[in-house]
Structures are given as C-alpha cells and as structure tokens.
Image (cartoon, rainbow, N blue to C red):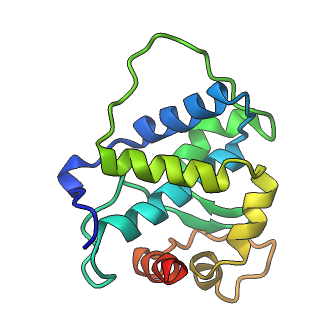
Amino acid sequence: MKNSHNKNDMYSKDDIINWILTKATEENDEITPKKLQKILFYVYAWGLVFFNETSEDIRNSVFDGEFQAWVHGPVDPEVYHLYKSYGYSPIKKEVTDEKTTNFNDDVQNVLNQVWNIYGSYSGDELESITHQEDPWKIARGKTSPLEISQTRINDKNIFNYYEKMMS
C-alpha cells in the first residue's frame, strides 16, 4: 500500500524550495538554480510514486509542479524565473528564525530520501542523470540536444519510470 498523502495536503512550491535551501545551508552545500531545479524535480517525481497507486489515477503530489524538458534537464519555469538572476552561482539563503513548514511524516520522508540520494551531486551531475532517464527523454522526443523545448514532462511517464526503479 502506498503512503496516504492526499492532494488536499499538498504543500506549496515555496515550502519545498525553502526546505531544500535550508537543508543545503545546514550542510554547508552550495546549491545553484540548476541543482535546485533537479532536486525539486526528484521530490516531485518520487512524491508521485509514493503517493499514488497507479499511473492511471494520479491524484496526489507533494506540490503542484509543472516540469518541462529543457536543454539542461527538467525545469519548472516558474521556479526558473524566480532564481535565474543567480545564473550559475549558488543561491544565498539567509539563515533566519523564520518559521519552517512542518511537513507530515510521509512528505518529510520523501524530502529526506531525495536529499540523501541526490543532494551530494552537483547541478551538472544531476543534469547528466536526468538526461539518461525516460521522462525527460520522452518529453524531448526528436528535439535536437540544444533546441529549446517547452514540452511538459508527463506525470504518467514520471510515475511509470520511477516506480520501475523501485522494483
């Protein structure tokens, strides 16, 4: 049986981004916009797998994401525009006493697992990994490697690919 996270319990993208940036700061890790995008994609992808029974009835996710198959891997355009001013430089997160989101146990588990698996990779390494994976490759289709694409990466393809990785 899958975890019971419900779409009504979905967190905001900002909640997830804040968690990722805070985690990176706590671990003295530099996180570029590219790395942020890829970690965010993996949180979304694994959330689909853990919180849904099948790819035919995807109702639950950690947050409302819309990833497109860009040249450098999966990108959420909204997040891209928020952080593009950093270019290839690390995003600076001020350490504050601001209240962090209290995630339910299932979502906290996904966040921790994604960070533990992918957090040690650089943005370029994560780009290379995503380029080997079906969801990005299927969305890119016959698009040439350097050609701009705004094709959305299909949730069904994401679910099916990462669920297979678990077996």
Q: Position of residue 46 (x, y in %)?
A: 46, 64
State the residue at coordinates (32%, 31%): 102
Give the farthest residue toward the top: 97
Residue 80 lies left or right of residue 107; in this view the side is right
Q: Position of residue 140 (x, y in %)?
A: 64, 80
State the residue at coordinates (49%, 35%): 19
In this picture, is 19 found above or below 52? above
The answer, for residue 135, to whether it is visible in the render is yes
Residue 6 lies left or right of residue 44; in this view the side is left
In this picture, is 16 found above or below 109? above
Q: Position of residue 142 (x, y in %)?
A: 70, 89
Image quadrant where residue 72 sits:
bottom right
In this picture, is 10 found above or below 151? above
Give the farthest residue toward the bottom: 142
The answer, for residue 76, to whether it is visible in the render is no
Residue 6 lies left or right of residue 114; in this view the side is left
Q: Quadrant of the N terminus?
A: bottom left
Residue 68 lies left or right of residue 3; in this view the side is right
Q: Position of residue 68 (x, y in %)?
A: 56, 66
Pick the front one: 123 or 70: 123
State the residue at coordinates (55%, 38%): 20
Image quadrant where residue 30 sits:
top right
Query: Exactly how many numbered labels are in the figure?
Result: 0
Pick the front one: 7 or 87: 7
Pick the front one: 110 or 93: 110
State the residue at coordinates (24%, 56%): 5
